Amino acid sequence: MSITRHAIPTPTRARDLPGGSHIDAHRHPDHQLIYCSGGAAEVRTDSGTWIAPPDRAIWIPAGHRHEHHFFGPTRFHCIAFPLGERDDRAAPAVLATSALVRELIITCSAPEDLPAGELGRLRQVLLDQLDRMPREHLPLPVARDERLRAACVLVESDLEITWTLAALGRRVGAGERTLTRLFRTEFAMTYPQWRTHLRLHRAVRMLAEGHSVTAVAGRCGWASPSAFIDVYRHALGHTPGSSRRR
C-alpha cells in the first residue's frame, strides 16, 4: 500500500484523503476531536495506538504528540477545543458515537458555514453529548521492555501464526512466566486479550480498505468467519459486515 503524506491539519476542518494517507507526528495547543465519516483513522502516540471506524471518534488531549494513519478513502473531520473545555481527559480515548454526535461533528468541522453564535451552541451540545458516549477500551499500548516489544513484533508480523507464550519466550529470551508478568504489568491485560485487541485493530483497517469478512477473518488469525464475527460484534456492537458497508 502506498503512503501519501499530508500537511498537519488546521485545528478545525474537514478534508478528503485517499487510503494510505499519513500525517506526521505533531502536537496541538488545543484538544482535538477527530472523526472519519468514511474509511478508518488510526492515531499513534508514544504510549499506544487507537483506531476508529466510522461509528467512533478519537479524543486527543492538548499537547499530546500523535500521528494519523488512514485506511480506505476517508472523509476526515477535526474539531479543536481550547484548554478549559474537558481538561479531565488526560489521554487519548476512542468514543462510540450516536447518529446525533456524528452529524454534530460533521457540521462543526465546517465552521465557515455557520454564524458564530450558532456554531458555539452546537459545539457545546457536542461536548455534552460526548460525555454520554461510552469509551471503547481497545488501545494497543507500546511495550517498554525490550523482550515484550520483540514478542509483540513477532505476533504483529503475521497474525495467521498462533504463537504460544512459551514459543515467544524462546524466541525473545524470556520465560513464559516472565512474559505473562510483562503483559499484565505493562499492558494491564493478558496475552490473549492483547492479541484480540491487535486482531481487531487489523480487522478495522482491512475492512476499511474493502477486504471481505472472510478474508479479514483468515488473515487476522481467527479460526472461522463466524468466530471473527462474534468477537467483532461483542467488542464494537455491530457486525463486521455492517462496518464494511459503512
Image (cartoon, grey):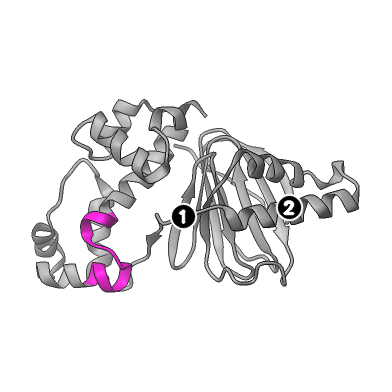
Query: Can residue 24 be seen at all in this image of the molecule?
Result: no
| The N terminus - image quarter | top left
Position of residue 205 in the picture relative to residue 149 (left or right):
right
Q: Secondary structure at mark 2?
A: helix
Location of residue 219 in the rendering, given as x and y in whole percent from the top left corner: 27, 36
Q: Nearer the viewer, residue 60 or 10?
A: 60
Query: Can residue 104 be seen at all in this image of the molecule?
Result: yes
Residue assigned mark 2: 125
Q: CA distance from mark 1 to mark 2?
A: 25 Å
* Residue 86 on the magenta span: no
Q: Residue at x 26, y 56 (%)?
A: 193
Q: Residue at x 47, y 49 (%)?
A: 51
- The disc labelled 2 sits on which kind of residue? Val
Location of residue 62 in the rendering, given as x and y in whole percent from the top left corner: 64, 68
| Snapshot quadrant of residue 215 | top left
Residue assigned mark 1: 50
Residue bounds of the magenta highlight? 182-194
